[in-house]
Image: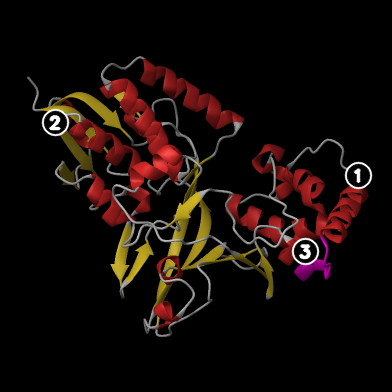
Amino acid sequence: MKKYDYLVVGAGLYGATFAREAADAGKKVLVIDKRSHIAGNVYTEEQERIHVHVYGAHIFHTNNTEVWNYLQRFAVFNRFTNSPVANYKGELYSLPFNMYTFHQMWGVVTPQEAAARIEEQKQAAGITEPNNLEEQAISLVGRDIFEKLVKGYTEKQWGRDCKDLPAFIIKRLPVRYTFDNNYFNALYQGIPVGGYTKMVANMLAGIEVKLGADYLSRKEEYDALADKIIYTGPIDAYFGYKLGYLEYRSVRFENETLDIPNFQGNAAVNYTDRETPWTRIIEHKWFEFGKDAAGNDLPKTIISREYSSEWKPGDEPYYPVNDEKNSALYQKYKDLADSETNIKFGGRLGEYKYYDMDAVVASALDFCKKELG
């Protein structure tokens, strides 16, 4: 008899969801994480009475009622609505592209005028079959919006010219002929009051957790503890990178605490020109306090400048590069994973998949139904 029914490797959303469900089903569970904290990349840390999103902004949004109701057990969500602002060389535009954006860009005041302006630019471009991201974007929103709000930001994000990026990266761009600044078309959205770390701590309540525990460096020892393993780390790392490294885009952050109550008046401002080295600035207090006196009562604010970067081994992996080469390599690793016994690979890194938070939880819950009955 092994000591645990399940060893869960990784205390992020996938691992925490599975651990909670397994524990509630009467299973004995150990959760380990090589970091010094729980919650994975949704980890928030309190600084200056502000919950800082340490690994970048995480805004929960979903149309999945089951997932929303599930997470209500562990957190109260505020009514934060993501309404980013684009800064192009000092010109400010509303995101997503909507009637405010079109008025700011061209001075148009009706949806018909805006649609006509975009259609005119699309026709002038004469693109029938987009061959790259630049042509795809222009065929969707016209040249003005592409040049000011898409091109520079995208090239900074991917580290490549838009002409050298595949068209499928921008399958669609949200264009709204309404005055709606809500970035997500989601029924439910918000931020957990008290931060994501508090929510994940509630999910893991009563479950044994070991931090600073590197599974892969002591794999045999950890495997001996449990009947089954739930692994949420990088799938290529599990197999010792023997088929090669899967590629990611990474992000680095420059954080600054400022002795003013309000830096930019919004949680997120995207810098869409190519010359500004960062992609966006996050002002963390506005995730939780709202743009009102409550936030300004705090005398300080904390901002993070985000820089997109090429990933190299040892860096934090953020965004899978789901091009043909990496997709083919992942499939080979998945074939190896499928031949393993008593182990489930799950989550963003285990499945080499860009998951929104709700999809991670949904995937874990679906697996729980099969695994735990």
Measuring 76% from the left and 43% from the top, which residue is drawn there?
136
Measuring 34% from the left and 56% from the top, which residue is drawn there?
76
Q: Which residue is mark 2?
A: 28
Local packing at callout 3 (Cα closer than 10 Å; few below 14, some 14-19, many 20+) is many
| Residue 328 at least partly seen | yes
User: Residue 260, how many percent across, how many down?
Assistant: 43, 85
Determine the image quadrant of residue 323.
Answer: top right
Q: In the rendered structure, which disc, 3 or 1, sits on the residue that comes first in sequence?
A: 3
Q: Which residue is mark 3?
A: 102
Residue 120 forms part of the magenta stretch: no
Q: Which residue is mark 1?
A: 126
In the image, is 108 to the left or to the right of 191?
right
Stretch of the chain drawn in magenta: 103-110
Q: Is disc 3 placed on a helix, strand or loop?
A: helix
Q: How many marks overall?
A: 3
Q: Label 2 vs label 1: CA separation?
A: 62 Å
Determine the image quadrant of residue 117.
Answer: bottom right
Residue 109 forms part of the magenta stretch: yes
Indicate the quadrant containing the C terminus: top left, top right, bottom left or bottom right.
top left
Q: Label 3 vs label 1: CA separation?
A: 22 Å
Q: In the rendered structure, which disc, 2 or 1, sits on the residue that comes first in sequence?
A: 2
